[in-house]
Image (cartoon, rainbow, N blue to C red):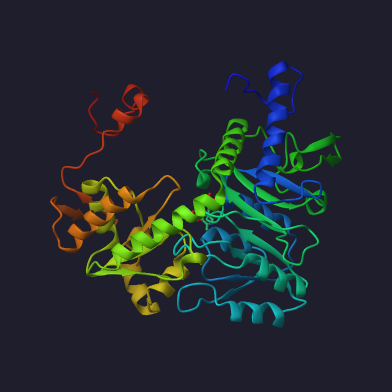
């Protein structure tokens, strides 16, 4: 922080230090996924979603171009493409993973019209991983490029996009800093330098140019060309720190640790009555530390609320920004879906699940606390009283109030009272 300054804009001492460091963080972020830094651009955005939007904006699709993706995707790896081309969704297999036979067939049958194959490296719902380098081979054989949404893969596995001339090379890849323990606000997009050298950037303004006349513009070189405005220098440094910490621990060590925790947790969870687990429960090599489940007869919001209020356990619940996938996993019929949508107003109320997931810092003791709490829930032995808000479908525990002022010291000092609220 003492050397924090704006970058690429001055010859002050701090500006030079910050510029050098900021540029180096791009190299660290690219090397983390095995990119050849002589031929690939590493761009910073604010998150994976923005990176995917940038690629969609920059890809110069024609309306009849086909993009093949899967129903497993996070909305962020689906909706941006729909703006520009025909998106074909491949289904899933029995375990909830991508139906690879169907995917390969779809890619091969559309040779010539398919321009991009966009798949996630690991699902944020089931944790199931896809054989991304193999899918890249199929895409290339059909004359297409591949994009991998690695938001959920990079925290859990070593990722290698392979050399540019390898048939299994990943052409484009994106991930977010906050998934690997750095703060929110930085996303990464890696892709061929020549791709980003061509054409105009999707966002224009300060930093993107080498020359501006009143009637003409010459764009700068990537990454600056693609990072309009003042960048998030502190976020970039935090990302590089997080990467170097993960590397010093070792991604293999992290993967083994998480696999061991997964086995232990699933082993204990499967003994509990009423707990329904989705996705693979054995052969866990192709699964990162994510366990989606429901308790029969209980709303996912209620289970998550009890885990939080009585167990101090943070899980996610809902549809995890992957609604088509959730509906498939939950076997929700279109009629059922319509009824649900009409009866309540907000997303948490749509069919959903609870998701327990591991960070690399979790251990068996954490799992034991979680399982003990879950064991109480399935026996209806929770202590509190819970009520649903009929407007939102979200549960809350009676008497459980969070005083944000205890955790954010500016909250009370500068709190702007709402309508009718008394000033303390
Ligand atoms: C698989 C996957 N893709 C994309 C995203 C979007 O990431 P971000 O919210 O950082 O843009 C997420 C976030 O949860 C995700 O899990």
Residue at image position (76%, 41%) is 225
**Coordinates of residue 276 in the picture (x, y in percent):** 30, 70
Residue 118 figure quarter: bottom right
Residue at image position (59%, 77%) is 100
**Which image quadrant: the C terminus?**
top left
**Which image quadrant: the N terminus?**
top right
Residue at image position (52%, 50%) is 253
Residue 24 figure quarter: top right
Near-viewer residue (172 or 24): 24
Relative vertical location of residue 166 with respect to residue 204 in this rendering, above or below:
below
Is residue 266 shown to the viewer in this render?
Answer: yes
Near-viewer residue (224 or 309): 309
Relative vertical location of residue 3 with respect to residue 202 in this rendering, above or below:
above
Residue 233 figure quarter: top right
**Coordinates of residue 111 in the picture (x, y in percent):** 75, 78
Q: Is residue 270 left or right of residue 177?
A: left
**Coordinates of residue 232 in the picture (x, y in percent):** 61, 34
Q: Is residue 43 left or right of residue 192?
A: left
Q: Is residue 361 left or right of residue 367?
A: right
Near-viewer residue (270 or 173): 270
**Coordinates of residue 344 in the picture (x, y in percent):** 30, 63
Is residue 391 shown to the viewer in this render?
Answer: no
């Amino acid at each position: 922080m003492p050397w924090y300054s704006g970058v690429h804009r001055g010859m002050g001492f701090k500006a030079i230090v910050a510029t050098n460091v900021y540029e180096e963080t791009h190299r660290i972020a690219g090397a983390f996924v095995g990119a050849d830094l002589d031929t690939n651009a590493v761009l910073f955005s604010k998150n994976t979603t923005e990176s995917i939007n940038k690629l969609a904006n920059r890809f110069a699709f024609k309306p009849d171009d086909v993009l093949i993706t899967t129903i497993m995707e996070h909305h962020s790896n689906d909706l941006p493409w729909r703006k520009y081309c025909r998106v074909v969704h491949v289904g899933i297999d029995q375990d909830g993973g991508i139906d690879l036979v169907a995917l390969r067939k779809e890619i091969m049958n559309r040779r010539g019209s398919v321009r991009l194959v966009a798949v996630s490296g690991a699902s944020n719902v089931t944790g199931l991983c896809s054989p991304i380098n193999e899918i890249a081979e199929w895409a290339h054989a059909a004359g297409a490029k591949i994009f991998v949404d690695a938001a959920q893969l990079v925290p859990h596995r070593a990722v290698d996009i392979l050399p540019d001339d390898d048939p299994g090379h990943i052409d484009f890849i994106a991930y977010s800093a906050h998934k690997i323990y750095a703060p929110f606000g930085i996303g990464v997009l890696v892709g061929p330098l020549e791709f980003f050298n061509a054409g105009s950037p999707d966002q224009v303004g300060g930093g993107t140019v080498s020359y501006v006349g009143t009637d003409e513009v010459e764009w700068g070189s990537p990454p600056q060309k693609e990072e309009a405005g003042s960048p998030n220098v502190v976020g970039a440094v935090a990302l590089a720190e997080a990467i170097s910490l993960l590397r010093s621990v070792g991604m293999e060590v992290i993967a083994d640790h998480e696999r061991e925790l997964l086995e232990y947790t699933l082993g204990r969870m499967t003994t509990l009555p009423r707990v329904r687990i989705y996705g693979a429960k054995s052969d866990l090599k192709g699964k990162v530390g994510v366990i989606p489940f429901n308790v029969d007869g209980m709303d996912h919001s209620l289970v998550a609320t009890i885990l939080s209020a009585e167990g101090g356990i943070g899980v996610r619940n809902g549809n995890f920004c992957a609604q088509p996938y959730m509906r498939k996993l939950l076997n929700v019929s279109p009629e059922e879906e319509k009824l649900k949508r009409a009866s309540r107003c907000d997303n948490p109320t749509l069919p959903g699940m609870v998701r327990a997931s591991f960070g690399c810092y979790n251990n068996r003791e954490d799992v034991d606390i979680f399982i003990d709490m879950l064991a109480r829930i399935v026996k209806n032995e929770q202590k509190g009283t819970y009520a649903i808000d009929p407007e939102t479908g979200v549960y809350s525990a009676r008497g459980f109030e969070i005083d944000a002022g205890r955790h954010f010291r500016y909250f009370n000092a500068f709190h702007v009272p709402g309508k009718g609220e008394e000033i303390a």
